[in-house]
Amino acid sequence: MRQTSILAIAASLVCATLTFADDHATENKNLPVTKAEQDALNPDKVLEDLKEGNERYKNGNHTDLNTKARVKAAQKGQFPKAYVLSCVDSRVPVESIFDQGIGDIFVGRVAGNVENEDQLGSMEYAAAAAGVKLIVVMGHESCGAVKGACDDVRLGNLTLLIEKIAPAVNSVEGYEEQEMSSKNKSFVSEVVHTNVERTVQDIRDRSPLLANMELEGKIKIIGAYYSLKDGSVTFME
């Protein structure tokens, strides 16, 4: 039933966006992705595009995006390349990190970049209905939510979110109990990476739709780590 609904949404989306003509050249990176451009992409091409965008970001060579033109073009429809699940941290501006603009990528944000039913449904929509080729789960250096999980913080609804990260904390080995806290940068970093890896696997386990699309080569689901120090993104391939 769930997959049928997704496919129905896909059909509706196609009908609603048939009027979005390819009215700009493929090499014009100053406008959103068109349907033809999206169709020509595959997961590896999109991954390479994000890597190249991050290199531009690190080097201060952002694409000179024409926001006004993009807003106008995007009114006709959207054909994004990727879905990035990121933390809410204000130091992690996802579109900027990958040098992307309006209409290029979906971004889901939640403290600790954990998946829940809402995020999974959003990813399924993005992949099965809107045609993205890549799903990225991106953790980052010094993540506050991960630090909270390391210290087993109890605070309102945050407690429930922390519990989703706790399995990553408990699965990191090689540390004495007194070393397993937010004060230990090495431990926090390992938990961040482990949390990303677990989230990637959870997406596959909890969404047969996305898992099957990945097996068919239609999408790729991958983890990544963002450095606050130098703005670099390391993909966990």
Image (cartoon, rainbow, N blue to C red):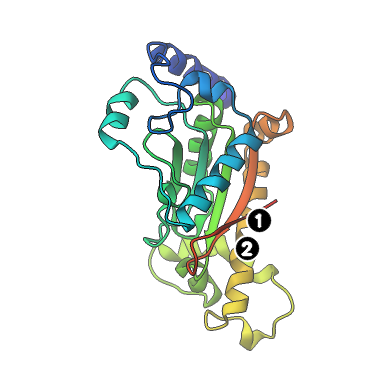
Judge left or right: residue 21 versus residue 226. Answer: left
Residue type, mark 2 in image: His
Per the image, the residue denoted by label 2 is 193
Q: Position of residue 55 (x, y in %)?
A: 53, 52
Q: Tell me: residue 97, above or below residue 106.
A: below
Graded by Cα atoms within 10 Å as few (under 14), some (14 to 19) or many (20 or more), the crowding at tag 1 reads some
Badge count: 2
Please give the label number shown on residue 197.
Answer: 1
Q: Position of residue 114 (x, y in %)?
A: 53, 54
Determine the secondary structure under disc 2: helix
Q: Position of residue 28 (x, y in %)?
A: 43, 28
Residue shown at 54% from the left, 26% from the top: 131
**Quadrant of the image for the N terminus?**
top right
Front residue of 54/124: it is 54
> Are dots 1 and 2 in contact, CB under 8 Å?
yes
Residue shown at 67% from the left, 49% from the top: 201
